[in-house]
Amino acid sequence: MPKIYTKTGDQGETGLFGGRRVSKDHPRIEAYGTVDELNSFIGLVRDFDPRLETVQNHLFDLGASLAAPADQKTKGASPKGDSPKAEKKAAPVGGTEICFLEGWIDEVEGKLSPLKNFILPGGTVTAVRFHLARSVCRRAERRVISLKEKEGVLPEIIVYLNRLSDLLFVLAREANRREEVADIPWTKRGV
Protein backbone atom coordinates (compact mmCIF):
# COMPACT_ATOMS: atom_id res chain seq x y z
CA MET A 1 0.00 0.00 0.00
CA PRO A 2 1.43 3.42 -0.93
CA LYS A 3 2.17 5.83 1.89
CA ILE A 4 0.25 9.10 2.26
CA TYR A 5 3.48 11.07 2.50
CA THR A 6 5.71 11.44 -0.53
CA LYS A 7 8.34 13.87 0.82
CA THR A 8 8.24 15.68 -2.54
CA GLY A 9 6.87 18.84 -0.89
CA ASP A 10 9.42 19.06 1.90
CA GLN A 11 11.23 21.94 0.19
CA GLY A 12 8.11 24.11 -0.10
CA GLU A 13 7.11 23.12 -3.62
CA THR A 14 4.27 21.05 -5.00
CA GLY A 15 3.37 19.57 -8.36
CA LEU A 16 0.56 20.68 -10.63
CA PHE A 17 -1.28 18.36 -12.99
CA GLY A 18 1.11 17.91 -15.88
CA GLY A 19 4.18 17.78 -13.65
CA ARG A 20 5.16 21.46 -13.33
CA ARG A 21 6.50 22.27 -9.84
CA VAL A 22 5.61 25.54 -8.14
CA SER A 23 5.98 27.11 -4.72
CA LYS A 24 3.26 26.17 -2.24
CA ASP A 25 2.33 29.86 -2.02
CA HIS A 26 1.88 30.19 -5.80
CA PRO A 27 -1.42 31.91 -6.72
CA ARG A 28 -2.67 28.67 -8.32
CA ILE A 29 -2.07 26.75 -5.08
CA GLU A 30 -3.69 29.56 -3.05
CA ALA A 31 -6.74 29.39 -5.35
CA TYR A 32 -7.38 25.66 -5.30
CA GLY A 33 -6.31 25.38 -1.66
CA THR A 34 -8.93 27.92 -0.66
CA VAL A 35 -11.55 26.07 -2.73
CA ASP A 36 -10.57 22.92 -0.81
CA GLU A 37 -10.96 24.81 2.48
CA LEU A 38 -14.39 26.00 1.34
CA ASN A 39 -15.36 22.41 0.56
CA SER A 40 -14.42 21.42 4.12
CA PHE A 41 -16.57 24.19 5.59
CA ILE A 42 -19.50 23.06 3.48
CA GLY A 43 -18.96 19.60 4.94
CA LEU A 44 -19.90 21.10 8.32
CA VAL A 45 -23.41 21.90 7.06
CA ARG A 46 -23.92 19.18 4.47
CA ASP A 47 -26.68 17.50 6.46
CA PHE A 48 -28.76 20.71 6.14
CA ASP A 49 -29.70 19.85 2.55
CA PRO A 50 -28.63 16.86 0.43
CA ARG A 51 -27.92 19.20 -2.51
CA LEU A 52 -24.83 20.42 -0.65
CA GLU A 53 -23.14 17.14 -1.57
CA THR A 54 -23.61 18.12 -5.23
CA VAL A 55 -21.98 21.46 -4.46
CA GLN A 56 -19.04 19.66 -2.84
CA ASN A 57 -18.61 17.57 -5.99
CA HIS A 58 -18.72 20.73 -8.12
CA LEU A 59 -16.03 22.28 -5.91
CA PHE A 60 -13.84 19.20 -6.19
CA ASP A 61 -14.07 19.38 -9.99
CA LEU A 62 -13.41 23.12 -9.87
CA GLY A 63 -10.35 22.63 -7.65
CA ALA A 64 -8.99 19.93 -9.95
CA SER A 65 -9.38 22.31 -12.89
CA LEU A 66 -7.48 25.02 -10.99
CA ALA A 67 -4.69 22.52 -10.26
CA ALA A 68 -4.07 22.19 -14.00
CA PRO A 69 -2.37 25.08 -15.78
CA ALA A 70 -4.42 26.35 -18.73
CA ASP A 71 -2.00 24.83 -21.22
CA GLN A 72 -2.48 21.39 -19.63
CA LYS A 73 -6.29 21.32 -19.80
CA THR A 74 -6.67 21.05 -23.54
CA LYS A 75 -4.30 21.09 -26.47
CA GLY A 76 -4.22 24.50 -28.03
CA ALA A 77 -5.36 26.42 -24.96
CA SER A 78 -3.44 29.62 -24.50
CA PRO A 79 -1.49 30.24 -21.27
CA LYS A 80 -4.15 32.81 -20.31
CA GLY A 81 -6.88 30.26 -20.94
CA ASP A 82 -8.65 32.65 -23.29
CA SER A 83 -9.37 30.30 -26.17
CA PRO A 84 -13.19 30.00 -26.16
CA LYS A 85 -13.00 26.50 -27.63
CA ALA A 86 -10.51 25.36 -24.98
CA GLU A 87 -12.53 26.98 -22.19
CA LYS A 88 -15.74 25.26 -23.26
CA LYS A 89 -14.07 21.85 -23.23
CA ALA A 90 -12.25 22.43 -19.95
CA ALA A 91 -14.87 24.22 -17.83
CA PRO A 92 -15.49 22.21 -14.64
CA VAL A 93 -18.65 24.18 -13.96
CA GLY A 94 -20.84 26.05 -16.41
CA GLY A 95 -24.35 27.18 -17.15
CA THR A 96 -26.01 24.06 -15.81
CA GLU A 97 -24.25 24.22 -12.44
CA ILE A 98 -24.73 27.99 -12.17
CA CYS A 99 -28.46 27.63 -12.94
CA PHE A 100 -28.62 24.91 -10.27
CA LEU A 101 -27.34 27.43 -7.71
CA GLU A 102 -29.59 30.25 -8.96
CA GLY A 103 -32.69 28.05 -8.83
CA TRP A 104 -31.84 27.03 -5.29
CA ILE A 105 -31.27 30.66 -4.27
CA ASP A 106 -34.66 31.64 -5.72
CA GLU A 107 -36.35 28.75 -3.90
CA VAL A 108 -34.86 29.71 -0.52
CA GLU A 109 -35.42 33.44 -0.97
CA GLY A 110 -39.10 32.72 -1.54
CA LYS A 111 -39.32 31.51 2.06
CA LEU A 112 -37.45 34.45 3.60
CA SER A 113 -38.66 37.88 4.60
CA PRO A 114 -37.12 40.60 2.43
CA LEU A 115 -33.93 42.15 3.77
CA LYS A 116 -34.32 45.76 4.83
CA ASN A 117 -30.77 46.24 6.12
CA PHE A 118 -27.45 44.46 6.41
CA ILE A 119 -27.28 41.58 8.88
CA LEU A 120 -24.50 40.34 11.10
CA PRO A 121 -23.26 36.76 10.90
CA GLY A 122 -25.02 35.07 13.78
CA GLY A 123 -28.05 33.27 15.06
CA THR A 124 -28.03 29.49 15.13
CA VAL A 125 -24.84 27.43 15.02
CA THR A 126 -25.81 26.22 11.56
CA ALA A 127 -26.34 29.80 10.34
CA VAL A 128 -22.91 30.78 11.65
CA ARG A 129 -21.37 27.80 9.85
CA PHE A 130 -23.00 28.94 6.62
CA HIS A 131 -21.65 32.46 7.19
CA LEU A 132 -18.16 31.03 7.73
CA ALA A 133 -18.45 29.03 4.52
CA ARG A 134 -19.66 32.18 2.73
CA SER A 135 -16.64 34.12 3.97
CA VAL A 136 -14.27 31.39 2.79
CA CYS A 137 -16.13 31.31 -0.54
CA ARG A 138 -15.53 35.06 -0.98
CA ARG A 139 -11.83 34.50 -0.20
CA ALA A 140 -11.70 31.68 -2.76
CA GLU A 141 -13.24 34.03 -5.30
CA ARG A 142 -10.56 36.66 -4.55
CA ARG A 143 -7.79 34.05 -4.87
CA VAL A 144 -9.16 32.86 -8.21
CA ILE A 145 -9.35 36.46 -9.46
CA SER A 146 -5.72 37.00 -8.41
CA LEU A 147 -4.76 33.89 -10.36
CA LYS A 148 -6.76 35.15 -13.36
CA GLU A 149 -4.65 38.31 -13.39
CA LYS A 150 -1.45 36.24 -13.65
CA GLU A 151 -2.28 33.10 -15.61
CA GLY A 152 -5.87 33.16 -16.70
CA VAL A 153 -8.87 31.32 -15.31
CA LEU A 154 -12.02 30.03 -16.91
CA PRO A 155 -14.69 32.71 -16.33
CA GLU A 156 -17.31 30.15 -15.28
CA ILE A 157 -15.28 29.42 -12.14
CA ILE A 158 -15.58 33.01 -10.94
CA VAL A 159 -19.32 33.16 -11.72
CA TYR A 160 -19.89 29.86 -9.90
CA LEU A 161 -18.06 31.03 -6.76
CA ASN A 162 -19.93 34.33 -6.81
CA ARG A 163 -23.29 32.56 -6.99
CA LEU A 164 -22.25 30.03 -4.35
CA SER A 165 -21.48 32.80 -1.87
CA ASP A 166 -24.99 34.18 -2.47
CA LEU A 167 -26.46 30.72 -1.87
CA LEU A 168 -24.51 30.30 1.37
CA PHE A 169 -25.82 33.68 2.56
CA VAL A 170 -29.47 32.76 1.96
CA LEU A 171 -28.93 29.32 3.50
CA ALA A 172 -27.61 31.03 6.65
CA ARG A 173 -30.81 33.05 6.78
CA GLU A 174 -32.87 29.91 6.10
CA ALA A 175 -31.12 28.10 8.96
CA ASN A 176 -32.21 30.88 11.31
CA ARG A 177 -35.76 30.90 9.87
CA ARG A 178 -36.16 27.15 10.42
CA GLU A 179 -35.22 27.54 14.08
CA GLU A 180 -37.33 30.70 14.43
CA VAL A 181 -34.27 32.80 15.26
CA ALA A 182 -34.25 36.35 13.93
CA ASP A 183 -31.40 37.62 11.78
CA ILE A 184 -29.27 40.13 13.65
CA PRO A 185 -29.44 43.57 12.00
CA TRP A 186 -26.30 45.65 11.68
CA THR A 187 -26.60 48.74 13.84
CA LYS A 188 -24.73 51.61 12.28
CA ARG A 189 -22.86 53.71 14.80
CA GLY A 190 -22.93 57.48 14.59
CA VAL A 191 -20.08 58.99 12.60
Image (cartoon, rainbow, N blue to C red):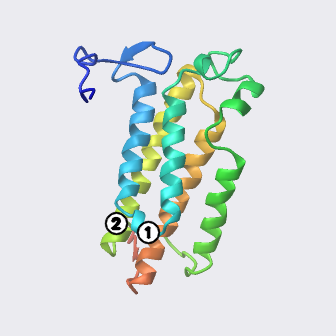
* Mark 1 element type: helix
Q: Where is residue 138 in the image (x, y as percent from the top left)?
A: 46, 47
| Residue 9 seen in the figure | yes
| Residue 118 seen in the figure | no
Q: Do the residues labelled 2 and 1 touch (CB within 8 Å)?
A: yes
Question: Could you tell me which residue is drawn at 39 percent across and 61 percent down?
Answer: 131
In the rendered view, would you say 78 is above or below 101? above
Which numbered disc covers residue 128? 2
Give the CA separation, mark 2 to mark 1. Answer: 7 Å
Amino acid of disc 1: Ala
In the rendered view, would you say 188 is above or below 17? below
Amino acid of disc 2: Val
Residue nearer the viewer, 80 or 40 = 40
Q: Position of residue 182 (x, y in %)?
A: 40, 82
The picture quadrant where one finds residue 126 is bottom left
Which residue in the protein does label 1 denote? 172
Question: Could you tell me which residue is drawn at 68 percent across and 44 percent down?
Answer: 94
The picture quadrant where one finds residue 78 is top right
Residue nearer the viewer, 29 or 49 = 49
Total marks placed: 2
* Mark 2 element type: helix
Q: Position of residue 105 (x, y in %)?
A: 60, 66
Question: Could you tell me which residue is drawn at 27 percent across and 17 percent down?
Answer: 12
Answer few, some or many: residues within 10 Å of disc 2's Cα (few below 14, many 20 plus, some between 14 and 19): some
**If you read the primary sequence from the N terminus, does the residue marked by circle 2 or circle 1 appear first?**
2
Q: The N terminus appears in which quarter of the rendering?
A: top left
